[in-house]
Image (tube, grey):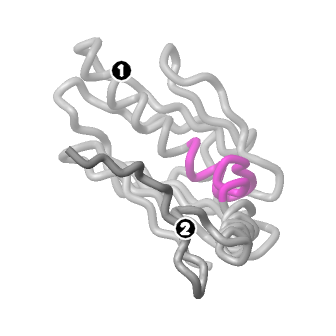
């Protein structure tokens, strides 16, 4: 048996073969794309986390309606959403603590069961244990940019709907 010792092969002449690594240019391009994405996305993300003005008022009113509906269904008895237009506050006793509308946001009108109620000291919107509610509409206005928001309740389902005009 003829055994010849094996010798390591020398690299082939010519252009260097590419290995599995990334080049500096590729890494810089990816870092640049990530930087641009973060630059554009972070302000929107911060705004979403930090609600203020009309967005906070809308969110709080919708949450109060949801809490009142949920409390009525769970407890098996009607639950009221109490709004005090002159004080700019609202609450759901036992389910949602008293909340004041943010500065620069005011109540433009309240209607309960087709009766204007914005001049009343206290307005009660009733949510019933079968998942229904009074017919309710509230308009909130932004003093800063003049935008308006209309929040309505569907009396059959007691679910809130929101329309915003800027």
Left or right: residue 77 compared with residue 147 = left
At which x and y percent is residue 85? 66, 45
Left or right: residue 16 compared with residue 144 = left
- Is residue 44 or residue 164 the one in the foreground? 44
Image quarter of residue 91: top right
- Is residue 41 or residue 25 the one in the foreground? 25
What predominant SS class does the magenta segment belong to? Answer: helix
Whether tag 1 and tag 2 are in contact, CB under 8 A, the answer is no
- Where 153 falls versus 164 (above or below)? above
Q: Which residues are magenta?
A: 45-60
Q: Residue at x 74, y 68 (%)?
A: 35
Q: Is residue 21 magenta?
A: no
Q: Residue furthest front?
A: 1
At which x and y percent is residue 10? 55, 67
- Where 122 falls versus 43 (above or below)? above
Q: Pointer 1: what residue?
A: 71
At which x and y percent is residue 49? 67, 47
């Amino acid at each position: 048996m003829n055994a010849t010792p094996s010798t390591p092969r020398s690299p082939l002449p010519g252009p260097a073969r590419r290995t599995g690594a990334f080049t500096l240019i590729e890494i810089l391009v990816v870092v640049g794309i990530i930087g641009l994405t973060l630059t554009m996305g972070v302000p929107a993300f911060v705004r979403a986390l930090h609600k203020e003005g009309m967005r906070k008022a809308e969110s709080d009113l919708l949450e109060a309606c949801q809490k009142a509906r949920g409390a009525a269904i769970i407890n098996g008895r009607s639950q009221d959403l109490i709004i005090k237009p002159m004080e700019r506050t609202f609450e759901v006793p036992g389910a949602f603590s008293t909340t004041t509308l943010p500065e620069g946001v005011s109540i433009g009108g309240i209607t309960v069961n087709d009766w204007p109620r914005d001049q009343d000291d206290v307005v009660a919107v009733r949510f019933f244990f079968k998942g229904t509610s009074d017919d309710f509409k509230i308009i909130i206005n932004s003093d800063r940019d003049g935008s308006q928001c209309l929040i309505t309740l569907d009396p059959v389902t007691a679910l809130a709907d929101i329309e915003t005009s800027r």
